[in-house]
Image (tube, grey):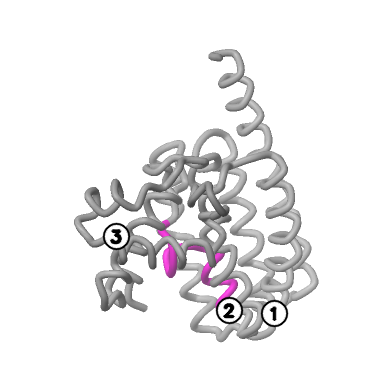
Amino acid sequence: MLPESEHAITSTDKTFLLLRKDIVEGVISSGSKLSETELSTNYSVSRAVIREAINRLESCHLVESKANVGARVVSISTEGLMELYQVREALEGMAARLAAINMTDDEIADLNTLLGTHFQTVKEGQTYYQEAGDLDFHYRIILGSKNSQLISILMDSIYHLIRMYRVQLGMSGPRVTTAFGEHKQIVQAISNRDAELAEMLMRRHILYSKNSLQLKLSGKLQAKMKAL
């Protein structure tokens, strides 16, 4: 599968993908106001292109607009994390269950190969960054569910908002090794076609991830309060 950037046809497509990446990775800070004029200068496109890109970012819940206030990047918050991960636990648990039933043997072999490449990253340092799309373990399992409604809800609506929390809060520290181990267990359950176990392991994995992110977010908020 080609990277999304290679599917981008129009200037708006390319700008949307760049803005989305910069928001997810924190280049554009969470909670920050989006100025069409400033962004059009920074990304060398017209304000009309920026306006359309912002509208598309709203549909994937990375930007929110209010009358007489304008558009802002969503804020990373404890409440937002809790609500998002409650939904994620249920839906990705279902995706893992369906993947154990519906993934082909070749797709499962590719998933195992992907984990092998991730192992090199985990082994060489205390980070576990996964690019969006085919290089993302969770992305592969969501597609492997073969349920178009579930794929649409996860991919089109909340996938990149989830990535925003994962990338900005959860890609380093002791959680790296344990998260990788949990990924291995999930893939083993899928390989064994054990749908019930795959769902249980995925739900537990996402719960543990949520707890880890919540601790990091709490630490960040406390540090911010002390600095005021």
SS type, badge 1: helix
Question: Which element carries disc 3, helix, strand or loop?
Answer: helix
Q: Which residue is mark 1?
A: 98
Which kind of residue does numbered mark 2 sit on? Gly
| Residue 50 in the image, given as x and y percentages of width and height | 33, 61
* Label 2 Cα neighbours within 10 Å, binned few <14 / some 14-19 / many ≥20: many
Q: Which stretch did the figure color magenta? A: 131-144
Number of labelled discs? 3
Image coordinates for residue 214, horizontal then vertical, percent: 68, 37
Residue receiving disc 2: 144
Residue at image point 67% right, 78% down:
100
Q: Earlier in the sequence, mark 3 or mark 1?
A: 3
The residue at 66%/78% (across/down) is: 150
Residue drawn at (42%, 43%) of the image: 26
- Where in the figure is residue 45, as x and y percent of width and height? 22, 60
In this image, 79 relative to 131: left or right? right
Q: Are marks 3 and 2 in contact (CB under 8 Å)?
A: no
Going from N to C along the chain, the mark reached first, 2 or 1, is 1
Cα–Cα gap, marks 3 and 1: 43 Å
Q: What residue do we see at 76% from left, 64% from top?
A: 90
Quadrant where the C terminus lies? top right
Say if 98 sits above or below 159 in the image: below
Q: CA distance from mark 3 to mark 2?
A: 39 Å
Mark 3, mark 2: which one is toward the viewer? 3
Disc 3 marks a residue whose amino acid type is Arg
The residue tagged 3 is: 47
Is disc 2 placed on a helix, strand or loop?
A: helix
Q: CA distance from mark 2 to mark 1?
A: 7 Å
The amino acid at mark 1 is: Leu
Pointers 2 and 1 in contact (C-beta within 8 Å): yes
